[in-house]
Image: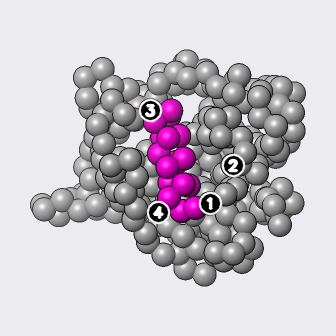
Amino acid sequence: MSSTDNFITIRGLRLHYLESGKPAQPTVICIHGLTNNAHDFDPLAAHLADRYRVIALDVRGRGESQWGPPADYHIPNYVEDLNAFIDALAIERVSLIGNSMGGRISILYAANYPKRVERIVLNDIAPSIDPAVTALINRNVIDTPAEFENLDEVVRFYQNNPSMTGLAGYKGTMLSEAARWSVKPTPAGRLIWKIDPALRGSSPGQTPIRQLDLWPQFEALSIPVLIVRGSDSEVLPLATAHQMCRRARDARMIEVPGVGHLPSLIEPEVLRALREFLPS
């Protein structure tokens, strides 16, 4: 089942989202990672659309969504965007699937608006990130080439930097498609990222990731949490994932072998876990 492209104005910005599935079924909203976009969830949506209304949102400044003031690119503001988005679509209850940054948005949203969330899936992310890992990601994002000659170059960049691009679990055609949706042509025929340059740390004093400790909000969650971890992930160490399971009221973990940051969520073991975990 193919998805439809939609646009909606939220808090003064025109945001883009993809929708597929059955409108009368439970709603699942998918939120992408730091420098990615809603199309990262195309493969997963194809598996969920027979049972759910699946919505994947382009967070402000990414994908087809409008760019905003650089000072407003932070997780608490994304949470308010999400709340206004859910209000505008008149959704009463929702389950959230968050890739990396999207997982942190999901934690804070569920903590701030507990009556609106059924359960959350956190893909390879913790309530806080080790400062050394944050610094490494920031450095890699800032050093990312701004332009490419063609799509093959973009794909090679993803292949050579799987964990730093947040697509370690994407292979073959799936990776090529993710790369295609991440760039747009320039008048000169080259390709540039489909993202506000400010999000890549091009503005003075702006870094791609800011330190944010969400452990208190995570521990306060009373809803079920599914943690997905790539076995080779530096962003979510195994010890931290176990700590999350201990400190949450209702959390379980599934690990995807041989994958860094982050799983695609269509690995067979993850799909089985999602079918058991998501509301019917």
Mark 3 crowd level (few <14, some 14–19, many ≥20, 10 Å Cα): some
Mark 1 crowd level (few <14, some 14–19, many ≥20, 10 Å Cα): few
Query: Is residue 230 visible from the viewing direction of this image?
Result: no
Query: Dividing the picture into quarters, in which one does residue 29 lie?
Result: bottom right
Q: Residue 77 colored magenta?
A: yes
Q: Which residue, given by chain and number where applicable, does mark 1 sit on?
A: 91
Q: Position of residue 170 (x, y in %)?
A: 58, 57
Asked if labels 4 and 1 touch by Cβ distance under 8 angstroms, the answer is: no
- Say which label, 2 or 3, has the lower sequence index: 3
Q: Which residue, given by chain and number where applicable, does mark 4 sit on?
A: 17
- What is the residue that sits farthest to the left in this orientation? 188
- Say which label, 2 or 4, has the lower sequence index: 4
Q: Amino acid at mark 1?
A: Ile
Q: Residue 203 colored magenta?
A: no
Location of the C terminus by quadrant is bottom right
Q: Which residue, given by chain and number where applicable, does mark 3 sit on?
A: 74
Residue range corresponding to the magenta coloring: 74-90
Q: Residue at x 56, y 51 (%)?
A: 31
Q: Residue at x 47, y 24 (%)?
A: 210
Q: Considering only vertical position in the picture, is 266 above or below 127? A: below
Asked if labels 1 and 3 touch by Cβ distance under 8 angstroms, the answer is: no
Q: Which residue, given by chain and number where applicable, does mark 2 sit on?
A: 116
Mark 4 crowd level (few <14, some 14–19, many ≥20, 10 Å Cα): many
